[in-house]
Image (spheres, rainbow, N blue to C red):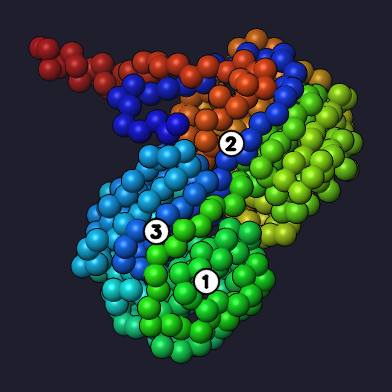
Amino acid sequence: MAYIGDDMPHKFVVEGGARLQGAVTVSGSKNAALPMMAAALLAKGPTVLRNVPDLTDVHLMAEILETLGCEVTLFAEPGVVVIDVVDETPIHAPYELVSEMRASFCVMGPLLARRGEAHVSQPGGCTLGERPVDLHIKGIQAIGCEVTFQRGDVIAKGRPTGGRVYLGGPMGPSVTGTANVLCAAVMGSGVTVIDQAACEPEIANLVAMLNSMGARVHGGGTSRLVVQGVDELHPADIAVIPDRIEAGTLMIASAITRGDVTLEHCDPDVMLALFDKFTEMRVPFERVDATTVRINCPKRARSADLTTLPYPGFPTDLQSPLMALLCTSEGYSLVEEKIYPERFMHVPEYRRLGADIRKQFNTCIVTGVEKLSGAPVAATDLRAGAGLILMGLVAEGATEVLRIQHVDRGYDRFEDKLTALGGSIRRVEYLPRRRASDRNSQRNRAA
């Protein structure tokens, strides 16, 4: 359940010491669902997405789509989102919504393809560092559209005519950039070839959706996409793939608690980079069948070096959770972040729990410790919040995790799943301490 619009902030209180055991079902992928929701703009009428996770980001994307002429029905049935495009005149995605979620920039490609014009606010930076949209813009210009900037908005106009697009960049292929250019090209007048496209399973899921709508896209899941433009698309009815990042986080939760957890409705074939690290770290795992994995780890894991890379390399979104496991493993580990070099904001919070981490530039040296101690900590981003919760599961005493709105962006009922496995984690409301400036302002008003 997503927590939307609560006046009182929440925190997690995690009690350490329990060994996670049992079975858990993996939810649908956030990183697949969001661009697929945006792609619903490509066809008038109702598109049905199934296996959609109930996240605050999904609710926010629904709100953005409603400003763009859609009627969105969320979860009338479990996991089902219906997006009915009823008005195709709006073309502006406003700053107050786009600024809250970078993935919302993915509406540009579908708007441009279907309506001939898109005005989308520039999303800006975030706690992972600056993530510019220059690859999106370069790609859209390369397929024959005009792009200008006005009052903080990116304005794209014209019907794509096709062309060659290269999406390689210093941080690797852009996933959202690939989604945007792909969606813009599917209703173009010619052939578009996208080289160095993102190979992530989430892009392959988007390609499957577009083809089910009548698009002609070849190469989903590879670094080259070939798009033959079509004149018209129709609504789709398609399922979102399982969330490989949630699956990986739950696998790591089993390992860090020396637990025995079976994950159902996941895709082991997209988890090979994590399984490779598990083998190196002496974490036993078993592929029970095509959609089921068991992690049974009765002993302390050992250290391993880690480098994040674009898919099929080790995902940057699992760097923070796996670092939590490395903090309690035997030996020394080297963690190198090559996707988002600034994605180490969680390190001071991990240290508050007793972790031994030394950071230099985009690299951390992690020395495993035998025990952690509970303390108040704050999530600095989505995946860091998950890592803090995992550390809290094994820390002595209680760990209070604040700013959990980050966790609600990407994990569907995370605390419920951990509790069902035997973990002790509670969501509670709390009153933030007022700053001295707030107290002084109140006294001045009273005077």
Other residues around mark 1 within 10 Å, as few (<14) / some (14–19) / many (≥20): some
Q: Are marks 1 and 2 in contact (CB under 8 Å)?
A: no
Q: Quadrant of residue 322?
A: top right
Distance (Cα) linking label 3 and label 2 = 33 Å
Q: Residue placed farthest to the left in the image?
A: 447
Q: Which residue is mark 1?
A: 211
Q: Position of residue 83 (x, y in %)?
A: 35, 54
Q: Is residue 442 above or below residue 362?
A: above
Other residues around mark 3 within 10 Å, as few (<14) / some (14–19) / many (≥20): many
Q: Secondary structure at mark 1?
A: helix
Residue at horizontal 65 percent and vertical 67 percent from the top: 221
Q: Nearer the viewer, residue 40 or 180?
A: 40
Q: Earlier in the sequence, mark 1 or mark 2?
A: 1
Specify the amino acid type for callout 1: Asn
Distance (Cα) linking label 1 and label 2 = 35 Å
Q: Earlier in the sequence, mark 3 or mark 1?
A: 3
Q: Secondary structure at mark 2?
A: helix
- Name the quadrant of the N terminus: top left
Q: Which residue is mark 3?
A: 47
Q: Nearer the viewer, residue 265 or 307?
A: 265
Q: Nearer the viewer, residue 34 or 360?
A: 34
Residue at horizontal 51 percent and vertical 57 percent from the top: 238
Q: Position of residue 149 (x, y in %)?
A: 30, 71
Residue at horizontal 40 percent and vertical 73 percent from the top: 233
